[in-house]
Amino acid sequence: MKIKKILLFAICILFVTAVFAQSEERPNIIFIHVDQMHWQAVSAYGNKYVKTPGIDKMVKDGYSFRTHYSANPVCSPARASWFTGRVTSEHGLAINGHRLPSDLPDLGSWLKDNGDYVTAAAGKWHVTGRDQSDGFKLISTYGESKGELFDAQTARACVGFLENYAGDKPFFLTAGFVNPHDCCYTSGAQGGEAKFEFANQIKRDLPPLPENFWSYKGKSRNEKANKEKEDYFKFYIYMYYKYMEMVDAEVGRLYDALMSSKFKDNTMVIFSSDHGDGLGFHGWSSKSKMEDEAWRVPLIIVPPGKMQNESEDWDHPSIGVDLTATICDYAKVPLLPKMTIGKSLKPIVEGQEVDDWHTYIVGESWQGNGGAKVGIRDKQYKSIIYVSGKVLVYDMINDPLETKDLANYKTGEKVLKRHKKYLKDYLDKITIYTPSEEKSNSTKKPKKTKKVFKTINEFYNQVKTEW
Ligand SMILES: [Ca+2]
């Protein structure tokens, strides 16, 4: 009898140890990112003009954060935020062409050093100034090729990794896809806004223009309907969705490979885009604006073991650096040094009540389209404040297409007052990067970096002292 009791006790101890060990286990993490994807370009979100069966599977299996925004709606600054956890004015890569300071750790080295992860990378990186091989084993390299070819290579390299990885350590795999970015080549110098001979042949298939096509900076454009411009944009949108479908096939290839692999139950997948695209909203294409078409991006989290309940969250506005905090949380490692803004979305995914979520988020954009500006978003309203002094205020619940600027109305004035306080609060939290700290050989364009940071400092000092 005594022996039986001892045996039972021993079994209990073993069981508890096993459960404890399991809870301590770090999941594999796959970060899938695309380039220039509009936040609504997903068929599972009800878009009838694009078919995205690959991304739809992640939507079905996971948790979609529908009020998610890029840290900066421009490529390199957004990517630098993902991988360092710092906002633009903190990490120093303020505009495309700048270089990330060499002393900041990135997610690759961080997870390797703090979580004993094997870190691997395929595809697009575009964090200029940082050699990706410092923090990751490169399983395919990124050349100058267009996404049509390059994305297939990236997906296949990732599938090969999943089929061959036999290590004991968990892995962190970053898969950087290019498309639908290559819409740029048909909207720009290589064809104007989609001036294609065969546009006439597919006229019946062309999607309609967005309802706010003729709206500009919160007002209707006072110009006659321009049939030629409308036709160009219809074709542009059609073509953009084809680029979306191409990249979706490759994203789906990777996701399918994961779900039929031995890693399907202990891998977390996170999917997003560096920024959006105009896609005809407000009558334009491209990035860098703080209107939703450029600033807002998709974010899907499929937790280890999936959820299969197609959850959508619209109540928690989130920003690119939250993605970094979420990855650190799942990996059970501390946040990267000096992360000031990012919060983990994991508790929300797990259905917990989160009391201290962001009241507001701030995005920064220091180049392009109207010049330097910041966007401030709370649950209902958005302000866009240009360094030049121009201000726009939108009610995102009642006017989600941003057609009516409220800046000169009482509601807008109240919102702006509140949002200015938010911006000051944000500035109290962050430490602005100082270019003079750079070693002389760490940047190719020190003067340009200094110039942009002069603008940032002057603007933020004005906010702190005069508002
Ligand atoms: Ca980009």
Image (tube, grey):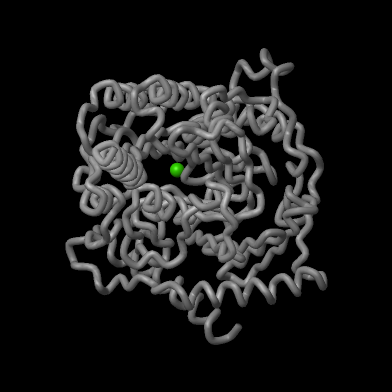
Q: Is residue 193 visible?
A: yes
Q: Quadrant of ligand 1?
A: top left
Comparing 455 with 431, the one in front is: 431
Spot occupied by residue 203 in the image (x, y as percentages of width and height): 71, 18
Which residue occupies 48% across, 35% down? 181
Residue furthest toward the bottom? Answer: 465
Side of 134 where 409 appears, left or right: right
**Quadrant of the rendered structure where residue 355 is?**
bottom right
Quarter of the figure with the N terminus: top left
Above or below: residue 10 compared with residue 56: below
Side of 137 where 88 appears, left or right: right
**Quadrant of the rendered structure where residue 148 is?**
top left
**Quadrant of the rendered structure where residue 166 is?**
top left
Spot occupied by residue 349 in the image (x, y as percentages of width and height): 54, 46
Spot occupied by residue 356 in the image (x, y as percentages of width and height): 56, 66
Side of 40 where 100 appears, left or right: left
Residue furthest toward the front? Answer: 1
Q: Is residue 21 visible?
A: no
Above or below: residue 29 compared with residue 360: above
Above or below: residue 325 compared with residue 297: below
The mark tally for this picture is 0
Spot occupied by residue 112 in the image (x, y as percentages of width and height): 23, 48
Which residue occupies 40% across, 60% down? 94
Comparing 451 with 81, the one in front is: 81
Which residue occupies 46% across, 74% down? 429
Above or below: residue 132 compared with residue 256: below
Quarter of the figure with the C terminus: bottom right
Which residue occupies 35% across, 42% down? 19
